[in-house]
Image: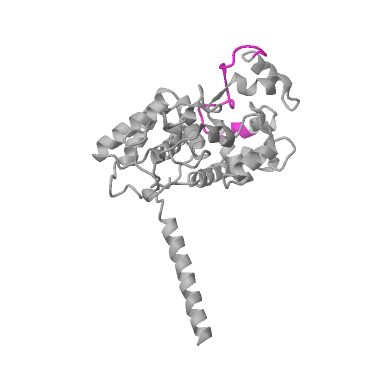
């Protein structure tokens, strides 16, 4: 009798775990808006494509916006909140101030989506996630099924943005540890860093590398120094790879040639544990695309808010 009771209890617990797992897997779904607003995703794509075609650098900016959102208390659109008496905006954190872009595009997407849906049903957090995917596709990169159903936060933290976002000055152990704290491994680190196949960086982020690092191609260093002197020109831009408006593997091949723009870029190929992945991605675009897509989905699941944990903002810049 006792053994039968234990068996029944064990069976119940197994079923409970399975039910909980199944429920959790359904919290986010690529089909979340199919019934409530089937035109939501095509609308996001249309607005994002128009913005990227107008200024191709915007694709990199929208991708970066998603990354900087997810790494600070999860993918909850906290990055979009403006400062108020109760909100210490993440926009003013050191990694973001005067560099993070794309907020106006997100505003336009929100306006168009709420109009087509007839009411505010699509969260700002989901808009940021989908806009990142659509930007990559618009610039020739892979697509993936974005998991949807996130809710928006009612708080933001400039301090946590300063502490949690990876720095362009980090070495490999620091980068690995930074990503590990977000539940991401070394493969995710290298794949997601491949997002630097798009866009540019400001002089102050790579000045020390081009003037002082030893593991840099001399000709490349000389070229970068011409627009990034030791003093002045802090906001001067340089491309993160030779083809900054095309999603390809030029970024990884640049690292092999010691032409990584940022110290944190070159750290991925400097005799460490990630050298093999850098070479593999540089010679196999399909492998990079597949891993990048997987890592983007994984990053997009960091500390999500669902149900009554958050809200669907009426305005992405402020709480309801």
Magenta stretch contains residue 239: yes
- At x 53%, y 28%, the residue is 93
Nearer-the-camera pick, 110 or 12:
12
Where in the figure is residue 111, as x and y percent of width and height? Answer: 30, 32
**241 is higher (above) or lower (below) than 153:** above
For the residue pair 256 and 37, the one nearer the viewer reads as: 37
Would you identify the image quadrant in which residue 206 lies? top right
Residue 254's quadrant in the figure? top right
Q: Is residue 284 visible?
A: no
Considering depth in this image, is 313 or 31 the residue closer to the camera? 313
Percent x, y for residue 253? 64, 33
Q: Is residue 208 visible?
A: yes
Q: Is 205 situated above or below 4?
A: above
Q: Residue at the spot x=48%, y=76% of the render?
A: 9
Residue numbers of the magenta segment: 229-252
Q: Residue 154 placed where, x, y %?
A: 40, 39
In the rendered image, residue 280, in percent from the top left (x then y), is placed at 65, 42
- Residue 162 inside the magenta-drawn segment: no
What residue sits 26% from the left and 37% below the top?
Answer: 116
Judged by its main secondary structure, the magenta piece is loop
Considering every residue shown, the one lying at the far left of the view is 118
């Amino acid at each position: 009798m006792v053994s039968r009771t234990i068996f029944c209890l064990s069976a119940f617990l197994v079923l409970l775990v399975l039910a909980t797992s199944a429920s959790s897997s359904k919290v986010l779904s690529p089909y979340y808006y199919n019934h409530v607003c089937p035109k939501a995703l095509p609308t996001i794509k249309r607005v994002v494509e128009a913005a990227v075609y107008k200024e191709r650098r915007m694709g990199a900016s929208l991708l970066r916006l998603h990354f900087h959102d997810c790494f600070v208390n999860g993918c909850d659109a906290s990055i979009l909140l403006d400062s108020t008496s109760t909100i210490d905006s993440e926009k003013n954190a050191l990694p973001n101030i005067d560099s993070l872009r794309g907020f106006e595009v997100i505003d336009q997407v929100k306006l168009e989506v709420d109009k087509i849906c007839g009411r505010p049903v699509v969260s700002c957090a989901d808009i940021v996630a989908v806009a990142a995917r659509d930007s990559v596709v618009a610039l020739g990169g892979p697509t993936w099924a974005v998991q949807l159903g996130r809710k928006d936060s009612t708080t933001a933290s400039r301090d946590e943005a300063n502490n949690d976002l990876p720095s362009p000055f980090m070495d490999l152990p620091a980068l690995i540890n930074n990503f590990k704290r977000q539940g991401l491994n070394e493969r995710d680190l290298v794949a997601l860093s491949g997002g630097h196949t798009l866009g540019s960086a400001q002089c102050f982020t790579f000045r020390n590398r081009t003037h002082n690092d030893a593991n840099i191609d001399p000709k490349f260093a000389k070229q970068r120094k011409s627009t990034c002197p030791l003093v002045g020109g802090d906001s001067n831009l340089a491309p993160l790879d030779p083809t900054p408006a095309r999603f390809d593997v030029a970024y990884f091949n640049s690292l092999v040639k010691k032409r990584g723009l940022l110290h944190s870029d070159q750290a991925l190929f400097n005799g460490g544990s990630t050298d093999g992945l850098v070479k593999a991605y540089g010679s196999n675009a399909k492998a990079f695309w597949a891993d990048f897509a997987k890592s983007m989905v994984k990053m997009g699941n960091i500390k999500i808010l669902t149900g009554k944990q958050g809200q669907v903002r009426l305005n992405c810049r402020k709480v309801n």
